[in-house]
Image (spheres, rainbow, N blue to C red):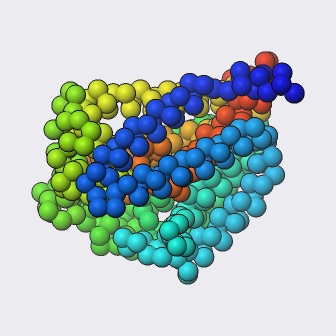
Amino acid sequence: MLQRFVEKLQRLDWLLLLSVLILFAFGISAIYSVALSRDAGFELISRHLVAFFIGFAIFIFITRSNYIQLRNYGRGMYILGILLMVAVLIFGTTLRGTTGWFIIGPFSFQPVEFMKLALIIELARYFGEHARRRFGWREILGSGILTFIPVGLIMLQPDLGSASLLVGIWIVFLFFAGLRFQHAAVLLGSAIVIGVLGWSLILADYQKERVQVFLDPQLDSLGIGYNISQAQIAIGSGQWLGRGLGFGSQSQLKFLPEAQTDFVFAVIAEELGFIGVLLVFIAVGILLWRVLVIALRSRDSFSAFLAIGVFASLFVQIFVNIGVNLAILPATGVSLPFVSYGGSSLLLSLILIGIVQSIAVHQHPGDSRSGAWYT
């Protein structure tokens, strides 16, 4: 028993775990800094730490469990996720214009976070079963239907950021499944048509304003574009070494809205400077690299696609959040994994890493099958 436990510890990807802990350390430091300027700010710290310890306990449980069982539960989790998405539209609480939360006392839950996990598992099962077939429109259509059912429900909330994340996860799956140039060209053309129709028929006025202000920040620098403008000021003022934790003018004087969630990257840039940002980028790079390595070493198609799904979720979310902070993407309300404040997001991120670690722990020498997901 002890020998098996030691062997599993040896197979644990310690670099992956280290990168997660480094990102969390940066996040809790930034949240602590923001809390200094809030009357009840230390409640943020306590809630975030509680969410982390609960999530870490779940992470350990999942790491020790056999992840392959998820293949049997994928469809049930997907259906449950759809039911939760419908339920939140009827019984959910509306915050900042989005009906996407269940709030019970001091606790809140976003069903979209569970939907991300369920979609990753279901797409991994789907692509794993079709891995040895010639990839074509049938696979694109089948996986697209699985993706756009929850996307449609999310747009009804409306939550453009979360809907974009699910679409981004699907696109990464398609890329690793063997998407061809002609497929990509047709999908791009379809996306342009859908975008034009969505602009006219689906997007709310405030969402249109975000895009317009992104293209021309001077249109409403004190309104819709205020957050982006303040984030740019915060990032630019950090210089090399930053102003120091608790001494950032934008975060401490409350010029930077949502400083602990959407714009926590700007807080880190202002208070820890270029060096702090560089360390965050290094930790992010190690995180994504190790997930891809585990995917390459996976022993079967489902395992490989499951790890790819985790990579897709983390990559898209990190890219969008940092892109918004750097003003290269319009504001979408997407958090930075392991760094931003938010119990639901933190729990999901730790669950995803637990799944990847379970894949690593249950691999054995000789299991590696490089490129297994598209062969």
Residue 360 on image: x %, y %: 70, 29
Residue shown at 65%/36% (left/top)?
356
Any part of residue 226 in sight: yes
Q: Is residue 311 above or below residue 90?
A: above
Residue 12 on image: x %, y %: 68, 27
Image label count: 0
Residue 100 on image: x %, y %: 49, 70
Residue 95 on image: x %, y %: 40, 72
The residue closer to the viewer here, 46 or 290, is 46
Q: Residue furthest right?
A: 1
Residue shown at 27%/39% (left/top)?
245
The residue closer to the viewer here, 132 or 2, is 2
Q: Quadrant of residue 292?
A: top right
Q: Is residue 109 above or below residue 5?
A: below
Relative placement, left or right, of 172 versus 43 is right
Residue shown at 76%/26% (left/top)?
8
Relative placement, left or right, of 37 versus 355 is left
Any part of residue 174 in sight: no
Residue shown at 48%/56% (left/top)?
47
The residue closer to the viewer here, 23 or 190, is 23
